[in-house]
Image (cartoon, rainbow, N blue to C red):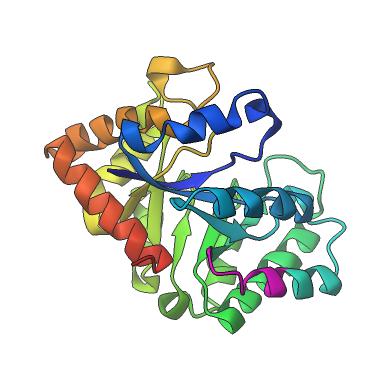
């Protein structure tokens, strides 16, 4: 069984066949899914899915691109949501400097604030880091990630950056980008990071693997990522599935 440690099944691209796809997961080898929020609005949409499906868990938090209008009242609401039984993380949160829609100072403020909230409620964090590696590491080092746990979602940093983050106990998420033809840096990082610190993800409906690139991604394509990681690590796919699933369960404190 595979564990999709980061998905977005609330996305509108699943509106026509959401339940049909989710109903097919377990018979296709997908044992667990963490559905990650990216805005206050999305939290309300993903919670019912976790009620409907025993294998779906939830992360609550606000993506940096949605941070401009955040308030302390929103932090109170996230804290309240975090008490739900199947909420297993605060996320996805972080920094995204690829676009300049939200000022860097605003992004940093709410990233730092949501990390503090995660420490308060003792939940791991799902971290979005795009073109912001230096600031992201600086803020992370201010917090006790080793105690609460966390994952660098869709890891795009170097092997050297991963080594710098190792003492925090953080995990590294790899998805469809691992299979891309031009993803040499990502594969080099995956080769250096110990398998015990790697989890698999889709970020669906985004980042479909090379074999289905351009299509809507889903957890049903995770085997392509597992196959690539098995090739990189020189292991059988079954071993990759077993270890990365154990890692994700440990990260999210799922029995």
Q: Position of residue 141 (x, y in %)?
A: 51, 74
Q: Is residue 169 left or right of residue 12?
A: left
Q: Is residue 66 left or right of residue 179?
A: right
Q: Which residues are magenta?
A: 78-87
Q: Position of residue 147 (x, y in %)?
A: 43, 80
Say if 149 sits above or below 102 in the image.
Answer: below
Q: Is residue 187 left or right of residue 116?
A: left
Q: Position of residue 170 (x, y in %)?
A: 40, 65
Name the one closer to the observer, 66 or 34.
34
Q: Residue at x 73, y 54 (%)?
A: 44
Q: Which residue in the rendered view is the most extreme toward the bottom?
A: 120
Say if 231 sits above or below 146 in the image.
Answer: above
Q: Is residue 230 left or right of residue 200?
A: left
Name the one closer to the observer, 185 or 11.
11
Quadrant in the rendering for residue 43: bottom right
Q: Residue at x 46, y 65 (%)?
A: 150
Tell me if I can see residue 113 in this picture: no
Q: Residue at x 56, y 53 (%)?
A: 50
Q: Position of residue 46 (x, y in %)?
A: 64, 49
Name the one closer to the observer, 206 or 160.
206
Tell me if I can see residue 233 in this picture: yes
Quadrant in the rendering for residue 255: bottom left
Q: Residue at x 17, y 36 (%)?
A: 237
Where is the N terminus found, in terms of image quarters?
Answer: top left
Q: Is residue 14 magenta?
A: no
Say if 216 sits above or below 225 in the image.
Answer: above
In the rendered picture of this protein, how many numbered marks are placed on residues?
0
């Amino acid at each position: 069984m595979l564990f999709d440690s980061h998905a977005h099944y609330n996305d509108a691209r699943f509106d026509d066949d959401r339940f049909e796809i989710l109903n097919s997961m377990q018979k296709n080898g997908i044992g667990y899914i963490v559905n990650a929020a990216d805005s206050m609005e999305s939290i309300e949409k993903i919670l019912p899915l976790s009620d409907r499906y025993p294998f779906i868990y939830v992360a609550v938090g606000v993506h940096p691109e949605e941070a401009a209008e955040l308030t302390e009242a929103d932090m109170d609401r996230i804290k309240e949501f975090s008490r739900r039984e199947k909420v297993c993380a605060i996320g996805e949160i972080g920094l995204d400097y690829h676009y300049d829609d939200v000022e860097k100072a605003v992004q940093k403020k709410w990233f730092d604030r949501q990390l503090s909230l995660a420490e308060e409620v003792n939940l791991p964090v799902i971290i979005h880091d795009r073109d912001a590696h230096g600031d992201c590491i600086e803020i992370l080092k201010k917090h006790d990630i080793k105690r609460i746990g966390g994952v660098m979602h869709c890891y795009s940093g170097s092997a050297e950056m991963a080594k710098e983050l190792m003492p925090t106990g953080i995990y590294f998420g790899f998805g469809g980008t691992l299979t891309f033809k031009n993803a040499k840096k990502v594969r080099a990082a995956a080769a250096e990071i110990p398998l015990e610190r790697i989890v698999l993800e889709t970020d669906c409906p985004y980042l479909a693997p090379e074999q289905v690139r351009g299509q809507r991604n889903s957890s049903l394509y995770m085997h392509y990522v597992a196959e690539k990681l098995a090739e990189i690590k020189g292991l059988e796919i079954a071993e990759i599935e077993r270890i990365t699933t154990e890692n994700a369960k440990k990260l999210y404190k799922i029995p």
